[in-house]
Image (cartoon, grey):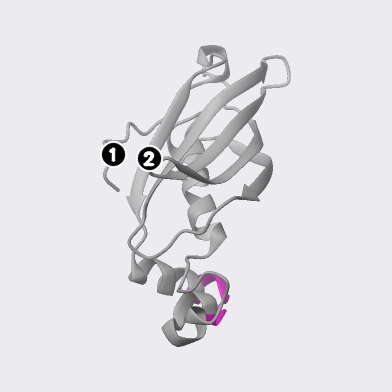
Amino acid sequence: MTDPIVRGTICINELEVGMMRSLTKEITDRDIELFAEVSTDCNPVHLDDEFAKGTMFKGRIAHGMLSAGLISAVIGEQLPGHGTIYMGQSLKFRAPVRPGDVVTAEVTVASIDPVKRRVTLETRCRVGDTVVIEGEAQVLAPACKS
């Protein structure tokens, strides 16, 4: 990861619509291999250069959920952060991520229900100016301790 990440918690009463946090990470061959091992998704489009050359992508691509996992990292570590409970996530995969690409995951507060502690977050991953994933997450934000 290349961003200096401030980890911790932003409690429900400290959240504001428009707040944004991000992280940036280069997706390496090792990341793809480890994700394949952990997820058991060993589709050759991710792991086999020769096979992947014959696909519509003309080369290997990273698992979409590997990049989407960076969104989870922003939510769980930064916004709202520690103690956040994921309730739902929609994802639209717009473009492939390739080994060596630098992905920036961005999370922005779209709406807040302070009574129920529910927060809707706009989520996005980019490689340069290209949006590779976009979606929306619903989370239960942590309450502040008195």
Q: Quadrant of residue 136?
A: top right
- In the figure, residue 119 lies in which quadrant? top right
- Given the current orientation, which residue lies at the most extreme bottom position? 50
Apparent side of residue 23 relative to residue 138 in the rendered image (left or right) = left
Does the rendering let one see residue 146?
Answer: no
Which residue is labeled 2 in the image?
A: 23
Specify whether 76 is left or right of 139. Answer: left
- Contact (Cβ within 8 Å) of mark 1 with mark 2: yes
Q: Secondary structure at mark 2?
A: strand
What amino acid is at disc 1?
Asp
Magenta range:
37-44
142 or 52, which lies in front? 52
Q: Amino acid at mark 2?
A: Leu
Q: Where does the image place residue 29, in percent across and percent down from the top left?
A: 35, 71
Tell me the residue at 45%/74% (across/down).
59
Please state which of residues 130 and 124 is positioned toward the viewer in this rendering.
130
Q: Residues within 10 Å of mark 1 (few under 14, many from 20)?
A: few
Residue, disc 1: 3
Does dot 1 land on a helix, a strand or a loop?
Answer: loop
Mark 1 vs mark 2, CA separation in Å? 6 Å
Q: Residue at x 46, y 25 (%)?
A: 20
Task: In the rendered structure, find residue 78 and report the number of the disc placed on it.
Answer: none
Q: Earlier in the sequence, mark 1 or mark 2?
A: 1
Tell me if I can see residue 10 in this picture.
yes
